[in-house]
Image (cartoon, rainbow, N blue to C red):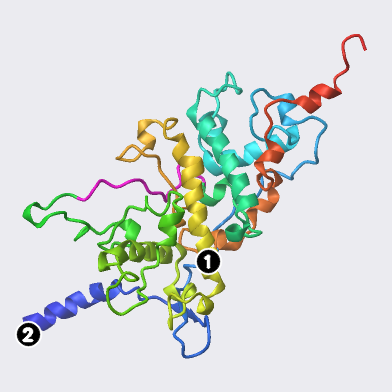
Amino acid sequence: MRLSYLLAALLPFALAACEIAPKTSTQNGFRGTGMNQIYVDGTQDADEVPAPPYELPPPGEQTAGEVYENVQVLANISDEEFTYLMAAITEWVSPEEGCNYCHNPANLASDEVYTKVVARKMIQMNQALNSDWASHVGNTGVTCWTCHRGNNIPENYWSEMPAPKSKGFAGVKQYDNTPTASTVYASLPGNYSDLFLGSQDNLDNISIASKTVYPSEANTRKTPDAEPTYALMNHMSDALGVNCTFCHNTQAFNEWSLSTPQRATAWHGLRMVGDINATYITPLTDVFPANRLGSEGDPFKTNCTTCHQGLNKPMGGYPMAKDYPALRMTPSELATETMTDAMAEEPAEGG
């Protein structure tokens, strides 16, 4: 009798873990194929997106590079658009600190505040993502807000994890009984350095599906080889707030011809994340102070959650970048080291 009372008392807590809430099921394929997507109502609602600081001004006569000193990026846009974008970036990244988060107020041209050096690299990253990675971001594009959401540091990031500890005579502990948030609290590898640092070979070897029944020269992968892949799939599913069937067909997970179009978008997204980390963040390692580095001395890096934050389209797919044309142009169109055009327009001495 006492046991039955105990079970009755614990039942609400057990059921609470099953997300008892109104859900919506949407069909993502032919009926009867098990391709439905099930969402807890409200979890895919679009995030609030800040409006532009003011109406984008028309191009002015002078460029930012002509008006301000040490403009290494965005030098060729108009002075008015430059100020407009700086106001937006302040709201996106440092709404409380204001301009002083990146600038010395006594000398705005100085690079002595490390966050200015970082911001310059991040602007170049935004331009590259919008111009070179349309295969993933499409026409929606990205801005600093996509990741930062009003925070100095994006809320979702990853850094290198310490190596697994030894467990004595049994050898290396690996990841047994060490659930982490990065794997949705599964006891799986939570270090994405092999996948999210631009290694094309590692990404190409994500698939571990055997093509033969028995071990052979064509089938040398072992069960532990599946753990990083399973951890990555857990991460992506949680980051986007979707089931596996958002990308894969339940009849044949490995078969591309039966997969949804989203699988191709995700394929490009994984490589885009690697490009972000390898090209734009890791090179800043020596720029960041110790409090902006992980326990292993590496900078905080991006993963799928950094942008998506539980939505299959960041911010519900709102095309925020359309209001900031300077972030949608290629870096080569905007960056300049010398103002040769401006100098050519100046009259020669004695002229």
Dot 2 falls on a residue whose secondary structure is loop
Q: Residue at horizontal 63%, vertical 45%? A: 127
- Residue 293 visible somewhere in the drawing: yes
Q: Residue at horizontal 54%, vertical 24%? A: 111
The residue where tag 1 is placed is: 45
For badge 1, the amino acid type reads Asp
Q: Residue at horizontal 42%, vertical 67%? A: 237
Give the percent coordinates (x, y) of residue 81: 72, 38
The label on residue 1 is 2
The label on residue 276 is none
Q: Nearer the viewer, residue 315 or 172?
A: 172
Can you say which quadrant of the picture contains the N terminus? bottom left
Q: Nearer the viewer, residue 79 or 12?
A: 79
- Of discs 2 and 1, which sits in the foreground? 1
- View extreme (top): residue: 350
- View extreme (right): residue: 351
On screen, residue 151 above or below 316: above
Give the percent coordinates (x, y) of residue 24: 48, 79
Label 1: how many Cα within 10 Å (few below 14, some 14–19, many 20+): few
Of label 2 and label 1, which has the lower sequence position? 2
For badge 2, the amino acid type reads Met
Give the percent coordinates (x, y) of residue 146: 55, 51
Is 226 magenta? The answer is: no
